[in-house]
Image (tube, grey):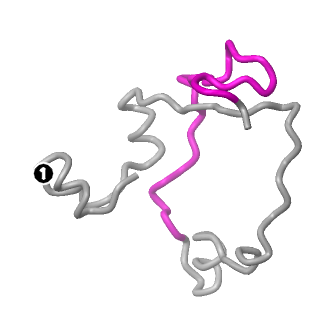
Amino acid sequence: MVNSTTWHAITSQAPPSKPPTAKEYKRAGYPRFDYCDAELKALEGSKTLATVKGVKEKGEGIRTAPLPENQSVSISNIVNLRASLKTNQVREGDPM
């Protein structure tokens, strides 16, 4: 993820005017990346970020439907980044 200034510096092109919807992302055949380990315990949530509202909550607060064009889609092109790794194994370097 880069901001518009960095995008222009990297590509020499103007950044897209809006991000692709989930449907457009799927239609383009872009993969979704899965990097999870079901055996790992989730980290405790941040107290600092606990009060941050998501896009949906902010939209509900002003009675609008945020991102109405971004409907859910089922994804079949999933790349599992941990498929060949053992628990606590990393692809490069040593685990901490």
List x then y, in percent, for residue 8.
17, 56
Tell me if residue 16 comes above or below residue 45 in the rendering: above
List x then y, in percent, for residue 33.
56, 32
What residue is drawn where x is 64% and y is 85%? Answer: 61
List x then y, in percent, for residue 42.
84, 48
Tell me if residue 41 comes above or below residue 46 in the rendering: above
List x then y, in percent, for residue 57.
66, 75
Q: Is residue 5 magenta?
A: no
Quarter residue 23 falls in: top left
> Observer-nearest residue: 63 or 87?
87
Which image quarter is the C terminus in? top right
Q: Identify the residue under disc 1.
A: 13
Please state the total of marks drawn on the protein image: 1
What residue is drawn where x is 48% and y is 44%? Answer: 22
Which residue in the rendered view is the most extreme toward the top?
84
In this picture, residue 23 sits left or right of residue 28: right
Q: Amino acid at mark 1?
A: Gln
> What residue span does the magenta drawing correspond to?
66-94
In this picture, residue 62 sits left or right of residue 1: right
> Observer-nearest residue: 65 or 44?
44
In this picture, residue 8 sits left or right of residue 89: left
Residue count near mark 1 (Cα–Cα under 10 Å), binned few <14, some 14–19, many ≥20: few
Name the main secondary structure of what is drawn in magenta. Answer: loop
